Image (spheres, grey):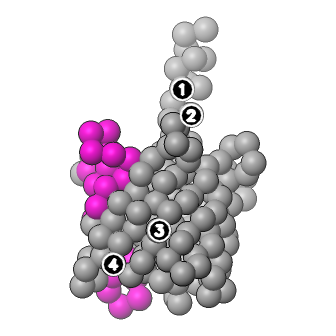
Amino acid sequence: MADLNGRIGGITQGYDLHADWNGERLSGRIGGRFEGKDIHLTLRAGDVDGRIGGTFAGFDADGDVTPERVDVRLGGRIEGDDVRLTIRGGRIQGRFSGRIDGKDVNLSVDDGRLQGRIGGVVEGKDVNLTLGDVPVELAALAAVCAYKALEDEQAAGAAAASSSTTG
């Protein structure tokens, strides 16, 4: 069993998240064997960096992660999203992808589980993860990474469906 284990999203439109933590590196898989992305995040002295996905179809993660906050950029400087979270008393709250087009992050930790929602009531996704020994701040970042991977996949699917009906 993975140290970080659970699901982002619902039964039909969601991704599983399974990752192992060795005290410095979180490595695993978002989604399934064929549809999904690898996740590799390294945490050293409050600095996190890594990659979600492969060389071509993926995004980088780079920033600062502490027990009080997460301040990370997913993707590049131009084509990317900010993750800004605060952690207080078992609550993780903040924004993913900016003030205007972004999504709220509202998570809580209780009894070794990270649960809550990323996004709104209609277009958001549920988060339900067991933490194992993974630091809460890194687990919250991994949840946002899984949300972004799922959101990117759904956008690509919608674009493909749209182009096939107009062509």
Q: Closer to the N terminus: mark 4 or mark 1?
A: 4
Identify which residue is drawn at 54% across, 26% down: 159
Amino acid type indicated by mark 2: Ala
Amino acid type indicated by mark 3: Asp
Q: Closer to the N terminus: mark 1 or mark 3?
A: 3
Q: Viewed as shown, does residue 117 lie left or right of 129?
A: left
Residue that label 4 marks: 68
**Residue 19 visible to an observer of this rendering:** no
- Rate crowding at label 2 as few (under 14), some (14 to 19) or many (20 or more) other CA atoms within 10 Å: few
Q: Is residue 98 above or below residue 5?
A: above
Q: Nearer the viewer, residue 163 or 118?
A: 118
- Residue 112: within the magenta? yes
Magenta-tinted stretch: 94-120
Amino acid type indicated by mark 4: Glu
- Rate crowding at label 4 as few (under 14), some (14 to 19) or many (20 or more) other CA atoms within 10 Å: few
Q: Locate residue 24, reporting x and y percent.
A: 63, 82
Question: Label 4 vs label 1: CA separation?
Answer: 38 Å
Magenta segment main secondary structure: strand
Q: Is residue 141 above or below residue 43?
A: above
> Where is the C terminus found, in terms of image quarters?
top right
Question: Label 1 vs label 2: CA separation?
Answer: 5 Å
Question: Label 3 vs label 2: CA separation?
Answer: 29 Å
Q: Nearer the viewer, residue 117 or 49?
A: 49
Residue that label 3 marks: 64
Residue that label 1 marks: 159
